[in-house]
Image (cartoon, helix red, strand yellow):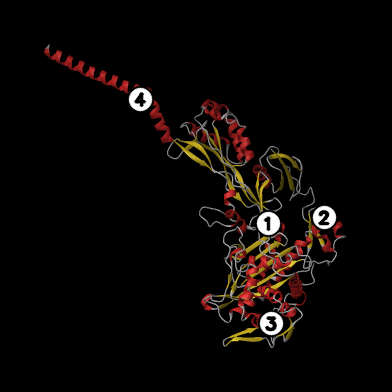
Amino acid sequence: MSTKRTISRKTNLVAFVLLVGAMAVVARVVHIQVVEGESWREQARKQSEFVQRIEPVRGNILASDGSFLAISLPLYDAYWDLGCPGAHRDSLRKYAQALGSGLVKILGKGNASECMNRIYAAQRIPARYYPLALGLRHHQVEAIKALPILSLPPYKGGLIIESRSTREKPLGILAARTIGRVSANEERLGLEAAYDAELKGKQGLRFMEKLSKNVVRPVFGENAVEPEDGLDIKSSIDPEIQEVLENELNRQLIASQADHGTAVVMEVKTGYIRAIANLKRGSDGQYYEGYNYAIGESIEPGSTMKLASMLALLEDGYVHSDDTIQTGQGSLVLAPNVTLHDSKTGGYGMLSVAKAFSVSSNIAIAKMVLKHYKNQPEKFLEHYRRLGLDRATGIEIPGEGMPLVKRPGDATWSMLTMPMMAIGYEIRQTPLQILTLFNGIANGGNRMKPQFVEAILERGKAIKTFPPKVVGDKMCSDTTLAQLMAMLKGVVQNGTADNLKGHVIPIAGKTGTVKISGGKQGYTKTYQASFCGFFPADNPTYSCIVAVTNPTFESYYGNRVAGPVFKKVADQVYSNSYKINRFHYTKMERSASAAMRYKGTAAEAKWLEKFLPVAVQSVPKTPGTDPKAMPNLQGWTVSDAVVALAERGISPRIVGQGKVHRQTPAAGTHYPENTLVLLELAP
């Protein structure tokens, strides 16, 4: 009996202890849920939720005509919360056929059965952030939103759409280096870097939920800070001039087998850069947009700098274009081991000042500068300061090379500095800095600041403009200016560039051929050939510089290597600008090297030829040769509309701001290749 009682007491004790323990557990659970519940739930949320930054859509970079040089094309990623009410397995089974076949049709790939099997497998987990389709276009997203279940509100249907953007250059390599980039792992370049603050916009914020180690999804219903898209930049680049410049430079680089070359076209009256090309030979022998030599390569310019020397001599009244100077038999001893030579064997003998400039006589220019400025170098150098040759142009694009103008007292100043500076040595300038000098002469002595941007736009409306800007005082008197203009024309008419005369547009300028310095090792056997000037010679509209470095085939002289590029660019630019420059055509001769490109039918082009002294080429195919259906873009955003058109090879012209209100041609219209679509926007 006593044993049974003992066992009973022990059993009761154990039961009591278990009961008390259970009650304590229940009490603790109740306490945690009721009293501490909110605190623990908040801690859980903090551990599983976080704030994610939303990147805004980067602003576009436009050409001067409104076409795109760089654009952020929107892409969309579609995810599916398969744990939401609408994604119940019964619903998936019910709409399996419509879902599977719809997704395959929208994505253009895969098999409907395989697609649904993957969704079934993910639903068993269930996957709360299942990647349904990535990298979608706008029309694909709209089609997915119309599918069964996915068309329901987000809480019920579970469709999650996230947007991102990719940066594209619709015109390919055209002006690629000047357009630039801002990649995190690459050097920041060009307009992308210079106007990054305006282009990048402002980041937004959204709340994200961590579902597993590597899976997160947005938290529905939470407030988020909306991102602000970047502003657009309207550049000064003219796509047609840019294409001509790059093509002609590329042809000449191939013909001369040069290491690299650069060319720039500036609008005389405004200083806007209408085209800029920088091409370097790759390992495969082809030429690609490389380092921005026009802006960054500061080297001795050679004979193009004789323009500054002649300006100083004329402005100070020391010489007149009709004066004469003896150049002898083509050599001038400057120091025991330094002799200056002219390019003509046997020398030029007696020359007028104007003729000395047109044939680029080193001896004539050096002798005149030595005679008048040897004992007053600061007077000579004051002209360089007035011309802005001792400082950078101040362009916004990063990487401008610094010029070098020596002064008495500098460690490298010597008795040779003055005569060598006079002919373009012992001084350093970039091609753009030299072009600014010539452009000032073409512009009546007013030096313009080079500019690559015309305006900053918000929703198509200019909120900041960059009007033409005159820099410094007038470069020289009208008397000096008239003599310099005549001399620059003389270079082409009867001087070193006489191979460029007699073509569609009269041009004026100066050749340059310079040995490239190798530093302490002295001058190398590498040359740079250049030509800088403007056209038309009598009423300048554009100035241009072409520089080709290390040409290795046939010639290395500026008139033979750089001059032909200049001439062909001038011919084509003006042949394609009849409406603007029609008064020049009355003085032209018909030339096979130039043709006006007319955006119309072949019959219309033939008719125009009757009235023009140049050939006329029809650009697009005859309507109907390659018919396609014009999409309906009404109500679309600009970015989405541009993407849809780009996929069909169509270029847009955009007017107004907001979304697409009207389009021309209309939706459904059949269009030929190279069609230009007018998109009229409205809020």
Q: Residue 549 at x, y = what percent?
A: 62, 71
Residue reaching furthest to the left: 2
**Number of the label disc, if any, that sits on residue 32:** 4
- Tell me if mark 1 has few (under 14), some (14-19) or many (20+) residues whose alpha carbon lies within 10 angstroms of its own: many
Q: Are marks 3 and 1 in contact (CB under 8 Å)?
A: no
- N-terminal of the pair, mark 2 or mark 1, is 1
Q: Position of residue 104 (x, y in %)?
A: 60, 38
Q: Secondary structure at mark 2?
A: helix
Q: Quadrant of the N terminus?
A: top left
Q: What is the number of the mark on residue 602?
A: 2
Instruction: Give the label on residue 364, or none.
Output: 3
| Cβ atoms at labels 4 and 2 below 8 Å apart | no
Q: CA distance from mark 2 to mark 1?
A: 29 Å
Residue 286 in view (yes/no): no
Q: Position of residue 460 (x, y in %)?
A: 68, 45
Element under disc 4: helix
Q: Which residue is mark 1?
A: 237
* The image quarter in which residue 635 lies: top right
Q: Is disc 3 in contact with disc 4, using a CB cutoff of under 8 Å? A: no
**For the residue marked with disc 4, what is the amino acid?**
Ile
Which-is-in-front pick, marks 2 and 1? 1
